[in-house]
Amino acid sequence: MKQVDREGVNAVEGIFLRELKWIFREQPISDWGIDAHVEVTNRDEPIGRLLALQIKSGKSVFRKRGETYVFYGEERHLRHWRSHSLPVAIILHDPDRGLTLWQRVEEDQVKYGKRGRWSIEIPPTQILNAQAAEGLEKGVSDVTAFRRLRLTFDLPLMREFASKEEVYFSIEEWVNKSLGFRDVSIYFSADNMDDSEADHLISAWYPTHSIGEYMANVWPWLS
């Protein structure tokens, strides 16, 4: 991931965690226009309602049409988002100005151009902060979408698992927190688990202390 993209993801994660108090989960493997998803909380407790995010960072993504910013997207991403089990929001981040804007991807917001290109306007007033919670939360999906989400995101990982003889998980459990299970390190050899860097490190937080429930919901395709 480019440095400017990394800065954008980190900045957006910080806003969701500090200001909205929502749970942020990055999606580092799949490249289908979804960079992360967030889970709404109630008094810091997750309530199983989810929103997918595409995060774009840098001055070049802040194009203007009059006084309004415009995001120009790819046809493949819009096609994917329409059939997605979660609603999708676009997040634009300018690291130089510290400006982060948001817009929900909804059919009545999309303007179509030539050769499959499309655009969506983002008002400069739609700043990503605590006041954005109501607009972002509108229509978020319930927890039943979570398993379908994992199936969508994890297809590249499924294919990689299928080519390996062994797969090992090392899962963090925070025993005194409501989000019991957190990061998971994935190794393709038991010999590497003690001394080597993980083949994959994935944030997969889930509100339970039951390993069976965690595996069934976060990794449904393993069964």
Image: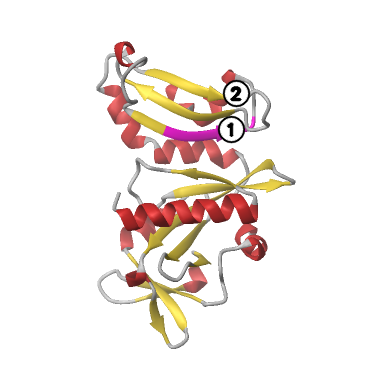
Amino acid tagged 2: Glu
Q: Toward the viewer: 163 or 21?
A: 21
Q: Are marks 1 and 2 in contact (CB under 8 Å)?
A: yes
Amino acid tagged 1: Tyr
Where is mark 1, residue-wise? 206
Which residue is pictured at 35% across the width and 30% down the height? 200
Q: Toward the viewer: 21 or 36?
A: 21
- The correct choice, above or below, for 131 with respect to 210 in the image is below
Where is mark 2, residue-wise? 213
- The correct choice, above or below, for 193 with respect to 149 in the image is above
Tell me which segment is drawn in magenta: 202-207
Query: Quarter-wise, where is residue 208 in the image?
Result: top right
Q: CA distance from mark 1 to mark 2?
A: 9 Å
Query: Quarter-wise, where is residue 72 in the image?
Result: bottom left
Dominant secondary-structure state across the stretch colored magenta:
strand
Query: Quarter-wise, where is residue 136 in the image?
Result: bottom right
Colour scheme of this structure image?
secondary structure
Q: Secondary structure at mark 2?
A: helix
206 with respect to 154 (left or right)? right
Location of residue 165 in the rendering, given as x and y in whole percent from the top left corner? 27, 14
Q: Residues within 10 Å of mark 1 (few under 14, many from 20)?
A: many
Q: Toward the viewer: 215 or 189?
A: 189
Which residue is pictured at 49% across the width and 22% down the height? 171
Q: Secondary structure at mark 1?
A: strand
- The correct choice, above or below, for 36 with respect to 210 in the image is below
179 with respect to 62 (left or right)? right
The answer to whether residue 185 is seen in the rendering is: yes
Which residue is pictured at 34% across the width and 32% down the height? 157
Q: Residues within 10 Å of mark 2 (few under 14, many from 20)?
A: some
The answer to whether residue 106 is seen in the rendering is: no
Q: Is residue 204 in the magenta section?
A: yes
Which residue is pictured at 32% across the width and 71% down the height? 60
